[in-house]
Every structure is written in structure tokens, then in C-alpha cells.
């Protein structure tokens, strides 16, 4: 019976409270037209329930409490108009209110109160729960309010207890309605829960909401780490970027230029190996990279890659490209850095030259800059130093630690040669040694870099040559000197010019021609519109009588000339003379020179002439091929053999066809089959094949019946019999083999190291590793 009475009592109290709140809500704020003050009336009644005496009045809340302002400030009143606060306040509300003139928002029975420039919290009875002492006090979220005390942020609960000390430069609630706070100090951010526990340490540049299950945190290196709401790592991987798609409820991840996709529950839809992932109204479109494998030629798989391409970057590092951006990783695929620079050179001693926006610098293998990216030119010197040129064309030299060793002390720092740098300061030239010490202080009016052990320098009036012991090799008594090649110099003296050696002996002198150009140690002369040539030893090769010169074959010891539109040529160092304009008129057809001889034809028969046009091997052969290894193939009566440069037959004509020798091996045909013979006619590879061809590396490809390919080693050792569609000699003891449009790798003795399942294969620059394309790029689409 007593329990029943108690229930009735509490029910009546509750009913009274509710009726009180509802009654208070029925009171409307009304402005008195006579006094311009505000009061309260019940809807539809003329009489005032609370007389108009307030400058500002706001509606009652559910608990029957309203905020009003009298002539002294803001107070709280109940529905009877009774004052609930012991004193007035400058304002009710919260420091983060979007509109301070709108009705203040209660948090349950609490409301923010401002006095002067300070904030606190009172309850609906007017009691201070949080003292009015804070510069800022935000609205409660999940029972927690962010406060600012003397420029530092913390957090309090509804009892006024400090759950996060006011020690932070900034504090905010995590987006997405998560019960977490983001704290910031000295540019770094971390995450704290509502009980004051650290979820993520204060070590990150930025912290963001990343969907229903994850939070993203940017490391000081600029990469993103993902954690769940309890602080557990989603993955050990770090990501370059990410984006949350609200409409699709998907999280797009970017790891070093490769994309992946998660759903709203952080479940993987696509791994982070794709070139691009986009959305249509109804589907997800994923464009993949090719799948590449890095391995040794011996068959060891090192790592698998999803990117456009890879290349060797020095010191067991890999340079990889993804959608036009470049990164560096180790051979196992662990990323070092990505998209820091536009171009990355090869690493040496842990450093590489890099380029970004047409400026150069130097970084280490983690991407950290050693020398800033600010130079228009930068070169690595043999000493390990770096030569730089800034945008004002000032040169400097840096060491491998990034220290500027020359500090704009010189107007010019030239190329490093023979242990010396050529320098210029205040229009005077000198030299630095390999340690950047002044080996010869700037004192010459002109100077060149060392070429071999010699360098041309100019004293006050004349030129001479010094050696590496700082001694005069040629006394400075010449009007002008210039290095042509090591130990050979161009000179001007008494209005004449010529060439001389390091011993001072003149090789050539003239007063009638001028120098047109210097070409790799050769001197092109010009006189009255005609050209001539001095050799790289300073001797006269061609007099100045030719319309033009073609210097493309100087490395082969040959120069081509035109005289009155007639083609001629000369062996540069030969001193027998020069061909006349009509020297080749004897011949019906001329071919290109080889080993000092030129194939010629007279009346359908072939022989050889020299550059002077003299017939050296008579035109009595059905055909000839160029000389190589001092012998030339020739044919008589449809049979081929070898002749030497004295027109002596060294191998009697016995083959149906024969090609030139190289390393004492030549392709030959007998009885309709091809093989390989030496200069004496000894069979190296038997005459059993449809064709044979020399590879670029001295091995021999063979084609058996049906076009199947194999390969022989020099000396006639069969490596692989004819069983493949194609074979490519890699030059490292291994071959690329093709079968049914797929590729693999065999050792040259036939042992297979990589199965024939790949689309493409290339050898990396270190000649130890290969890149194999296992799967081509494609595009797939799946419904959303």
C-alpha cells in the first residue's frame, strides 16, 4: 500500500513538472508598443503573464526557464517572472555561437554565461557550475566543452571537472560526430578521447575524419597513416593522399601514385595497385597498371611491382614511374620517396642529382635534400664534389654534405681535369686542386683546363704551356695558343698560324688560310671559300681546295670531300697525297670505303680501289664484299672465297655464299645450308641450317627448318637447338626466348631460368636484374 502511494506521489510530481514546462512554453514573448519593453503573454490572452520590463527576452525552454535582459544585464527567470540568478551577466550562450543575437541554447540544465571578457557555466537555478574565468567556452558535445584559458585550450565535463588540461594551442572535436578531440601544439596534432586518454600521440601534421571507421593522420614526412577510432592501425602502409566520396560512401587511397578503394566499413574493394579509380552514376571504373616482376637473370624473383615502368637507379635502388611521376624504392619494393622531384639521376655514394621545375639539386636515398633544388646546372665531379651554376651564372662547388666550398669567391669554376679546376677571379685565371685549395693563385690573363698533363696559359703579353709540376713546357713567347689535342697546339704568331707539338716543333704554318673550326682534335681550314684539314697530330691532310668536307667518319680514320660536286675521300693520316677530281672516273660504280679500300665495278666485274683512285684489286670478280679482318669475300664461277689486300686468294672459292670475317668467323653457305667458317675454311658451325646470323655480342643465331631459332656460342658450341619462335642475345650469358608471343629467359646453354609467360622483358642497367611484364594494363568496371 505504501509503495502504491509513493508511485502516485512521484507521478503527480512529474505531471506537475511537465504541466509547468508546457505552461511556460505557452508563454509568448511580446513587445509592448507603449514602452518598447518585452514581456510575456499566454497565447490568445490580453493580460500580461509577465509584465514588459525587459530590453531583450527569449522564449522559455522545456524546463520553464528563460533568458532576459534588464537595465543591468542578462538574468534567468521562471514562468512566474521570478529572478533565478543572483546577479546579471553580459551575455548567455556559448563562445562558439554562430549568431550571438539569437536565443541562447541550453545544454540540459546548463547554459554558458559571459561576464566581461570571461565565460563560465550556470545551471537553471543560477548556480555557477564552471567559474566565469575562461576566454572561450564552447557548447557541450557528449558532455564535454572545449575551453580557452590564457590562450591555451583544454576540456571540461558538465561538473566543471578538467578532463583535458588547458595546455594546447588548439583543440577541436573530430568531424563526423566522433567522441574524440584533436589537440594541437607547435604545429603537431594528436587525438584524445572524452576521458582524456591519448588515442594518437601528438606527432602528426594533420588529423582528419576519413569515413565511418577510419581516421587519417599526416606524418611529418607528408604521408598519411590510417587508424580506427580506438587508435589501432588499419595498415602498416603509409599513403600519399586519399579522398572520401560521400555520395558513394567509398574511401579512395593513393599510395605512391597507385590507387585502392575501401567501403564505408574499411573493407578492401580494390588493393592499392591501380593506375586510376573513378566513379560513374552506376559503377566503379578501375584502370590497372601492368604487373611487373623484378628478378635476377638467374631466375630469382626479387619483387613485384604495379607501375608503368622501372629502371635501375644505382646502389641496389629502383626508380619507378607511375602516371608520369617518379619515385625511388629498394629492390624489395619498399618505398623511399615518391613524387618529390620531376627527374632523379642514378645514386652514387648514397646521393643523386635531381631536377624539379628546370632546377637541379642533390638528395640522399630518402629524398632529403643535400643541395637545394635551385641551380640551372649541376654536375658531379670525379672528386665527389658538385659543380653548380645559379640563375645569375655564378658557379660554386659543394661537398657531399651540402657545404658550399667556394662561396662565390670566383667568377668562374671550370671543368675538373687532371686533378685541377680552372678558376677565374677579377679577370685573372688560376687553378684549384682536388681539395679546392688554390694550386695556382689567379694570375694569368687567359688559361685553359688541363688536357693530359698540359694547359695553355697567358702571361701579361704572350701564351705558353705549363705542366702539372707548374713548370713551363713551352715558354710564353707566342702571340696566341689553343689546345687542339693532348700535346698538340694551334698557334698564331707574326700574323701566321699553324700547329706545334709540346716539344715546340712546328708541324704546319700558313699565312693564307683561316681556321674554320676544331673537330675532336682536327683543324678545319678555310681559304677563299674552300676547305682543308689538319690531322689530330697537326699535319696537313687536305689542302684548302674542297667545296665541303664531311667529318662523320673521322673516328674510322676517313674524311669525305666534295670538289665541283664530285665525291672523293681520303684516309686522314695517309701521306701519299690527295685524290684528283677525276680520280674515280675510271669506274662505272663506286661503293662505300672499308678498311682503306673501296669496292668498285667496271663492266659488270668487281674489284677494289684506294682513295687515290688506284685499282688495287683488279675488277675480275663476279662480286666482292667489303674487307674485314684484312680479308674480303669474292666470287668466281658462282663460288665464294677470301682474298687479301695484295689480291692474293687465301681461301679458294668453294662456297655458294660467304660474308665478311669478324673475330675469325664468317657466315657461309654450302649445299643450300648455312653455317660458319674461319678464315682458313674450317667449319665452326656445321652447314645444317636455313640461316645463321651473328648477334651483337658475338654469338650466332641459327634457324632450323620451319624457322625455329637456336643459338651457338663462339667456337661452334651449340647452346640452344632450334626450338623457339625468336631468340634475343642479352649479352650477359642469357637469352630472351619467345614462344607463341610469350617471352622467357634461358641461360645460353639452354637452361630455362624464367618461364615463357611474359609479355615483355628488358635488362636493367646494372646487367644483373631484369624487368618482366607479367600482366598488361587493363580497365575493369563493376556496379556500385
Image (cartoon, rainbow, N blue to C red):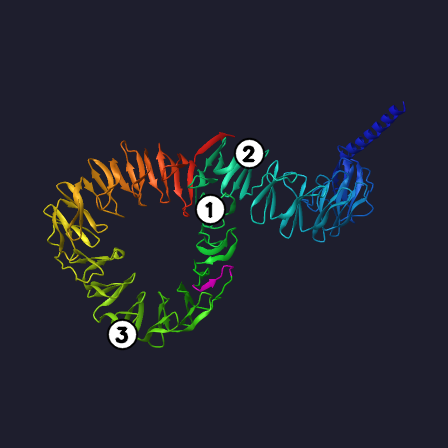
Q: Position of residue 644 (x, y in %)?
A: 18, 51
Q: Position of residue 712 (x, y in %)?
A: 31, 40
Are the residues at dot 1 and dot 2 in contact (C-beta closer than 8 Å)? no
- What residue is rendered at 37% in x and 44% in y? 732
Instruction: Please state which of residues 6 and 667 is positioned toward the viewer in this rendering.
Output: 667
User: In which image quadrant can residue 9 be found?
Assistant: top right
Q: Which residue is mark 1?
A: 318
- Mark 1 → mark 2, Cα distance in angstroms: 28 Å
Look at the numbered disc 1 and give the secondary structure of its residue. Answer: strand
Residue 537 seen from this side:
yes
Q: Nearer the viewer, mark 3 or mark 2?
A: 3
- Mark 3 → mark 1, Cα distance in angstroms: 56 Å
Q: Position of residue 440 (x, y in %)?
A: 42, 72
Q: Nearer the viewer, mark 3 or mark 1?
A: 1
User: How dense is the environment of label 1, judged by Cα within 10 Å: few (below 14), some, or many (20 and up)?
Assistant: many
| Residue closest to the far top | 1
Total numbered labels: 3
Look at the numbered disc 2 and give the secondary structure of its residue. Answer: strand
Q: Which residue is mark 2?
A: 268
- Mark 3 → mark 2, Cα distance in angstroms: 82 Å
Q: Which mark is residue 493?
A: 3
Can you say whether 693 is above or below 428 in the image? above
| Residue closest to the far right | 2
Q: Which residues are magenta?
A: 393-402
Give the mark nearer the N terminus: 3 vs 1.
1
Q: Which mark is residue 108?
A: none
- What residue is rendered at 49% in x and 61% in y? 399
Give the mark nearer the N terminus: 3 vs 2.
2
Is 10 colored magenta in this rendering? no
Q: Nearer the viewer, mark 1 or mark 2?
A: 1
Instruction: Please state which of residues 359 and 243 is positioned toward the viewer in this rendering.
Output: 359
Amino acid at each position: 500500500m505504501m509503495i502504491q502511494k509513493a508511485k502516485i506521489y512521484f507521478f503527480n510530481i512529474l505531471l506537475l513538472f511537465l504541466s509547468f514546462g508546457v505552461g511556460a512554453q505557452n508563454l509568448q514573448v511580446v513587445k509592448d508598443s507603449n514602452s518598447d519593453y518585452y514581456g510575456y503573454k499566454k497565447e490568445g490572452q490580453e493580460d500580461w503573464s509577465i509584465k514588459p520590463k525587459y530590453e531583450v527576452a527569449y522564449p522559455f525552454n522545456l524546463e520553464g526557464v528563460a533568458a532576459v535582459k534588464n537595465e543591468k544585464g542578462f538574468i534567468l527567470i521562471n514562468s512566474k517572472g521570478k529572478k533565478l540568478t543572483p546577479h546579471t551577466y553580459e551575455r548567455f550562450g556559448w563562445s562558439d555561437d554562430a549568431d550571438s543575437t539569437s536565443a541562447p541554447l541550453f545544454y540540459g540544465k546548463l547554459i554558458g554565461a559571459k561576464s566581461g571578457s570571461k565565460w563560465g557555466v550556470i545551471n537553471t537555478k543560477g548556480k555557477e557550475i564552471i567559474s566565469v574565468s575562461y576566454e572561450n567556452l564552447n557548447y557541450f558535445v557528449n558532455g564535454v566543452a572545449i575551453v580557452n584559458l590564457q590562450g591555451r585550450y583544454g576540456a571540461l565535463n558538465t561538473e566543471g571537472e578538467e578532463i583535458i588540461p588547458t595546455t594546447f594551442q588548439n583543440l577541436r572535436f573530430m568531424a563526423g560526430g566522433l567522441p574524440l578531440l584533436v589537440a594541437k601544439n607547435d604545429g603537431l596534432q594528436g587525438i584524445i578521447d572524452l576521458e582524456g586518454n591519448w588515442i594518437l600521440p601528438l606527432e602528426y601534421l594533420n588529423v582528419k575524419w576519413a569515413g565511418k571507421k577510419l581516421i587519417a593522420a599526416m606524418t611529418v614526412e607528408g604521408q598519411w597513416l590510417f587508424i580506427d577510432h580506438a587508435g589501432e592501425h588499419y595498415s602498416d602502409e603509409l599513403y600519399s593522399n586519399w579522398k572520401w566520396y560521400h555520395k558513394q560512401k567509398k574511401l579512395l587511397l593513393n599510395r605512391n601514385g597507385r590507387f585502392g578503394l575501401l567501403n564505408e566499413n574499411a573493407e578492401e574493394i580494390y588493393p592499392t595497385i591501380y593506375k586510376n579509380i573513378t566513379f560513374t552514376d552506376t559503377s566503379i571504373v578501375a584502370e590497372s597498371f601492368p604487373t611487373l616482376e623484378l628478378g635476377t637473370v638467374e631466375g630469382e624473383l626479387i619483387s613485384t611491382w604495379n607501375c608503368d615502368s622501372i629502371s635501375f637507379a644505382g646502389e641496389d635502388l629502383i626508380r619507378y614511374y607511375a602516371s608520369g611521376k617518379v619515385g625511388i624504392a629498394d629492390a624489395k619494393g619498399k618505398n623511399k620517396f615518391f613524387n618529390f622531384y620531376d627527374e632523379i639521376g642514378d645514386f652514387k655514394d648514397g646521393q643523386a642529382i635531381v631536377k624539379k621545375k628546370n632546377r637541379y639539386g642533390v638528395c640522399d636515398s630518402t629524398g632529403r635534400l643535400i643541395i637545394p633544388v635551385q641551380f640551372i646546372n649541376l654536375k658531379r665531379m670525379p672528386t665527389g664534389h658538385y659543380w653548380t651554376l645559379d640563375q645569375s651564372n655564378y658557379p660554386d662547388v659543394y661537398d657531399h654534405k651540402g657545404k658550399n666550398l667556394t662561396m662565390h669567391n670566383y667568377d668562374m669554376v671550370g671543368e675538373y681535369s687532371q686533378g685541377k679546376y680552372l678558376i677565374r677571379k677579377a679577370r685573372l685565371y688560376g687553378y684549384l686542386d682536388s681539395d679546392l685549395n688554390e694550386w695556382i693563385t689567379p694570375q694569368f690573363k687567359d688559361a685553359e683546363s688541363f688536357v693530359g698533363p698540359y694547359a695553355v696559359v697567358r702571361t701579361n703579353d704572350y701564351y705558353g704551356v705549363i705542366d702539372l709540376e707548374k713548370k713551363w713546357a713551352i715558354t710564353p713567347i707566342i702571340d696566341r695558343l689553343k689546345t687542339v689535342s693532348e700535346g698538340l697546339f694551334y698557334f698564331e704568331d707574326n700574323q701566321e698560324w699553324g700547329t706545334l707539338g709540346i716539344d715546340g716543333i712546328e708541324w704546319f704554318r700558313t699565312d693564307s688560310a683561316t681556321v674554320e673550326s676544331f673537330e675532336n682534335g682536327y683543324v678545319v681550314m678555310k681559304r677563299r671559300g674552300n676547305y682543308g684539314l689538319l690531322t689530330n697530330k697537326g699535319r696537313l691532310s687536305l689542302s684548302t681546295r674542297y667545296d665541303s668536307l664531311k667529318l662523320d667518319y673521322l673516328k674510322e680514320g676517313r674524311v669525305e670531300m666534295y670538289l665541283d660536286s664530285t665525291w672523293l675521300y681520303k684516309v686522314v693520316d695517309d701521306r701519299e697525297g690527295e685524290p684528283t677530281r677525276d680520280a674515280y672516273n675510271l669506274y662505272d660504280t663506286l661503293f662505300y670505303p672499308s678498311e682503306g679500300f673501296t669496292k668498285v665495278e667496271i663492266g659488270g666485274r668487281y674489284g677494289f680501289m684506294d682513295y687515290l683512285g688506284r685499282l688495287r684489286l683488279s675488277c675480275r670478280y663476279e662480286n666482292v664484299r667489303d674487307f674485314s679482318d684484312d680479308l674480303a669475300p669474292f666470287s668466281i664461277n658462282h663460288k665464294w672465297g677470301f682474298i687479301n689486300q695484295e689480291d692474293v686468294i687465301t681461301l679458294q672459292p668453294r662456297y655458294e655464299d660467304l660474308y665478311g670475317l669478324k673475330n675469325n668467323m664468317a657466315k657461309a653457305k654450302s649445299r643450300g645450308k648455312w653455317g660458319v667458317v674461319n678464315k682458313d675454311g674450317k667449319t665452326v658451325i656445321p652447314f645444317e641450317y636455313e640461316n645463321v646470323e651473328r648477334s651483337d655480342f658475338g654469338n650466332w643465331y641459327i634457324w632450323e627448318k620451319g624457322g625455329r631459332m637456336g643459338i651457338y656460342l663462339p667456337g661452334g658450341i651449340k647452346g640452344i637447338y632450334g626450338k623457339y619462335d625468336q631468340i634475343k642475345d642479352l649479352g650477359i650469358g642469357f637469352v630472351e626466348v619467345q614462344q607463341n608471343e610469350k617471352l622467357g629467359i634461358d641461360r645460353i646453354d639452354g637452361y630455362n631460368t624464367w618461364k615463357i609467360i611474359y609479355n615483355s622483358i628488358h635488362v636493367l642497367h646494372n646487367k644483373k636484374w631484369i624487368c618482366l611484364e607479367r600482366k598488361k594494363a587493363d580497365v575493369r568496371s563493376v556496379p556500385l
